[in-house]
Image: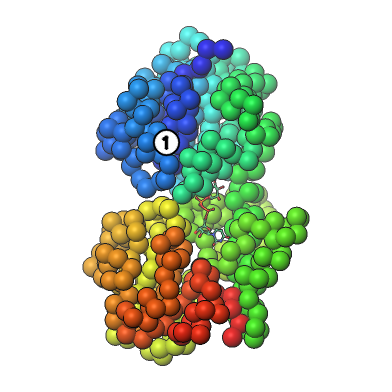
């Protein structure tokens, strides 16, 4: 089979990983973005954000010509290819509902290009969109702009993405499942054949369904994962009131039950990032519109709102007033292996510390440049863990980077003014640490 040519609109985590994934297997991929700076970087083979295992393949695919990135040239990208993945962003509106503005404008551009196309083309929505969007918004725009009929003249699918930042490329190449929402059989067959060819014998279980079901699968998946996190954080909060209880052991034992599973049961300071907070909010707003109040997810959100502030309470329990106290923050990114600060739990924690009059010094292996755009000169930025700990009254571990896991009690004792450590991600052994320094941790009963 001749490899179809692929265009990708939007070059965030999903767009870029999909682009590099296909290009690395010999497909001809044309990406298009509105961001000229990003496109220039990509065309030089430089990844525009921190993401492990992507850089080398990006460089290779740019050099061998399999991948090119255009700026604002959707029409050219669509005309030169057979199938278009739309992976533009779908941010939140102030009320939490989804903002589909980029989907609308990019779909209009695709439609105008389709008007000039003489061959069959499949449009695939990869962005996270609420149920009904592909059928009720994308399809009519495509038909209006192209003056063609969906199904007979061009194809339409909804194909959600389940990659995690920090392991985004690995997840793209080895997903647990492929979900294909299809407008009609021909559209679905075309996309499934592409994936069959792409993954070969390793093709993951593939679910073919309606456009709306595919859209809902994405929201239901992210909402359940967020629910697992808020659930275990709730159990952590109970553990703290029970002498000798430890949420880590509770979670390990729970996870051995096959019906529960061990993943996404790490108690901590809550979930952040560009997906869970946004998607939970969007599903709540969408459901409210349908006349159904999603109380369960409202609670999930509420738990996540208060959870990071527990770090402040722990601090105050140890230090009393925080005015003038030096607090060391280890980790700023919303999770390890990314420089992304969107909805990072470090933000509410640091803002509250500043409000309480503390002097904050923070260190993160990669997120400091982005953090500077948020906190400006309201906090100090350290160049290393040890510099961050120097003379601190208390340290809060916010993001569980690998290098922080290697720290010993002596590192804290030798560098801090008073060795008080709050483990917000449960990476330290409580027995070892509480013997040698003042130690508090999420979900640990004292
Ligand atoms: C999440 C989903 O895991 C992906 O499947 C999905 O494709 C993606 O959103 C998306 O919608 O695009 P991501 O936000 O990159 O991926 O990262 P996660 O690994 O899911 O972590 C999200 C947040 O949950 C982080 O702040 C992390 O610290 C927190 N978390 C995760 C916990 O607090 N406890 C856990 O056990 C797991």
| Residue 16 coordinates in the image, percent (x, y) | 42, 36
The residue closer to the viewer here, 66 or 4, is: 66
Q: Secondary structure at mark 1?
A: helix
Residue at image coords 35%, 21%: 65
Residue for point 28% across, 36% down = 41
| Frontmost residue, 365 versus 165 | 365
Query: Foreground: 66 or 81?
Result: 66
Judge from the rendering whether residue 377 lies leftward or rightward of residue 187; answer left or right: left
Label 1 crowd (10 A; few <14 / some 14-19 / many >=20)? many
User: The C terminus is located in which quarter?
Assistant: bottom right
Residue at image point 61% right, 21% down: 193
Work out which residue is located at the far bottom of the displayed protein and give it: 320
The residue shown at (58%, 64%) is 266
Q: Is residue 284 above or below residue 254?
A: above
Image spot of residue 119 (x, y percent): 50, 10
Whether residue 398 is visible, yes or no, is yes
In the rendering, at what x and y percent does residue 403 appear? 41, 62
- Using the image, determine if residue 216 lies above or below residue 348: above
Q: Quadrant of the N terminus?
A: top right
Q: Is residue 59 above or below residue 339?
A: above
Residue 201 as seen in the image, left or right of residue 18: right
The quarter of the displayed image where residue 348 is located: bottom left
Which residue is denoted by mark 1 in the rendering? 16
Residue 198 image offset from top left, x and y in percent: 56, 25
């Amino acid at each position: 089979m001749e490899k179809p040519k692929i265009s990708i609109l939007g070059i965030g985590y999903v767009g870029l990983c999909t682009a590099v994934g296909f290009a690395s297997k010999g497909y001809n991929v044309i990406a298009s973005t509105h961001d000229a700076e990003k496109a220039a970087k990509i065309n030089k083979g430089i990844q525009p954000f921190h993401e492990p295992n992507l850089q080398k393949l990006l460089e290779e695919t740019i050099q061998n010509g399999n991948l090119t990135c255009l700026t604002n040239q959707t029409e050219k990208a669509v005309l030169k290819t057979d199938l278009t993945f739309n992976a533009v962003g779908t941010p939140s509106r102030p009320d939490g509902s989804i903002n589909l503005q980029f989907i609308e404008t990019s779909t209009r551009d695709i439609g105008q290009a389709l008007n000039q196309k003489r061959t069959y083309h499949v449009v695939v929505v990869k962005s996270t969109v609420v149920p009904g969007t592909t059928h009720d918004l994308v399809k009519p725009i495509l038909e209006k702009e192209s003056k063609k009929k969906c199904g007979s003249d061009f194809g339409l699918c909804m194909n959600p993405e389940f990659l995690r930042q920090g392991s985004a490329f690995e997840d793209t190449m080895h997903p647990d499942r492929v979900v294909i929402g299809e407008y009609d059989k021909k559209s679905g067959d075309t996309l499934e054949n592409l994936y069959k060819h792409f993954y070969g014998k390793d093709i993951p279980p593939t679910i073919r369904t309606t456009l709306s079901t595919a859209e809902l699968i994405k929201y239901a998946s992210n909402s359940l994962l967020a629910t697992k996190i808020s659930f275990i954080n709730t159990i952590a909060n109970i553990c703290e009131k029970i002498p000798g209880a430890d949420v880590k052991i509770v979670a390990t034992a729970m996870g051995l039950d096959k019906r529960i599973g061990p993943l996404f049961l790490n108690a901590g300071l809550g979930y952040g990032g560009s997906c869970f907070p946004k998607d939970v909010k969007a599903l709540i707003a969408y459901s409210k519109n349908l006349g159904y109040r999603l109380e369960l997810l409202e609670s999930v959100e509420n738990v996540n709102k208060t959870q990071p502030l527990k770090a402040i309470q722990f601090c105050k329990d140890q230090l009393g007033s925080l005015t003038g106290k030096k607090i060391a923050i280890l980790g700023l990114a919303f999770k390890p292996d990314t420089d992304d600060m969107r909805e990072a739990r470090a933000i509410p924690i640091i803002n509250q510390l500043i409000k309480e009059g503390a002097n904050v010094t923070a260190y993160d292996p990669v997120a400091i440049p982005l953090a500077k755009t948020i906190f400006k000169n309201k906090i100090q930025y350290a160049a290393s863990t040890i510099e961050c700990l120097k003379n601190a009254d208390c340290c809060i571990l916010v993001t569980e980077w690998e290098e922080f896991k290697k720290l010993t009690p002596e590192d804290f004792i030798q560098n801090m003014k008073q060795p008080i450590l709050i483990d917000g991600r449960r990476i330290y052994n409580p027995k070892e640490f509480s013997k040698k320094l003042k130690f508090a941790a999420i979900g640990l009963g004292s």
